[in-house]
Amino acid sequence: MGESITQDMAYRQPLMRCVEKHGVMQAGRRYSKSRSYLCFWRACWDGTVESLSPAALPPGSLSDMFDNLYF
């Protein structure tokens, strides 16, 4: 698989910057995304676009992360 940045990854980067600057609730309203979606990707994000790729996550981590999110 190549090192290209997908449209989804390019979309998530400014979304995560908005979460960082304004918080989950305001970013969710602005981008019409759920709180759980934003919290999940915030936990994965390390400041790089590559960390927002689903391929960068270890197998099974999606279900593990959703099980461990507390609201």
Image (tube, rainbow, N blue to C red):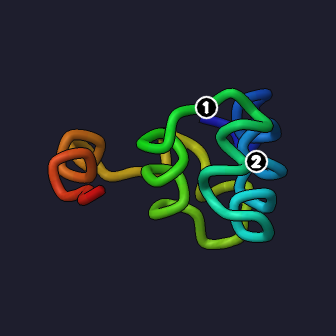
Q: Which residue is mark 1?
A: 33
Q: Does the rendering let one see residue 3?
A: yes
| Image spot of residue 46 (x, y percent) | 60, 72
Residue 44 drawn above or below residue 27: below
| Image spot of residue 41 (x, y percent) | 52, 51
Q: Are marks 1 and 2 in contact (CB under 8 Å)?
A: yes
Q: Secondary structure at mark 2?
A: helix
Amino acid type of the residue that numbered disc 2 sits on in the rendered structure: Leu
Q: Which residue is mark 2?
A: 15
**Earlier-in-chain disc, 1 versus 2:** 2
The circle on residue 45 is none
Viewer-side label of 1, 2: 1
Q: Residue at x 15, y 48 (%)?
A: 67
Quick one: 4 or 28, which is closer to the camera?
Answer: 28
Q: Residue at x 79, y 70 (%)?
A: 21
Which of the 4 quarters of the picture holds residue 70?
Answer: bottom left
Residue 48 drawn above or below residue 62: below
State left or right for residue 10 relative to residue 68: right
State left or right for residue 42 relative to residue 29: left
Amino acid type of the residue that numbered disc 1 sits on in the rendered structure: Lys
Quick one: 69 or 63, which is closer to the camera?
Answer: 69
Label 1: how many Cα within 10 Å (few below 14, some 14–19, many 20+): some
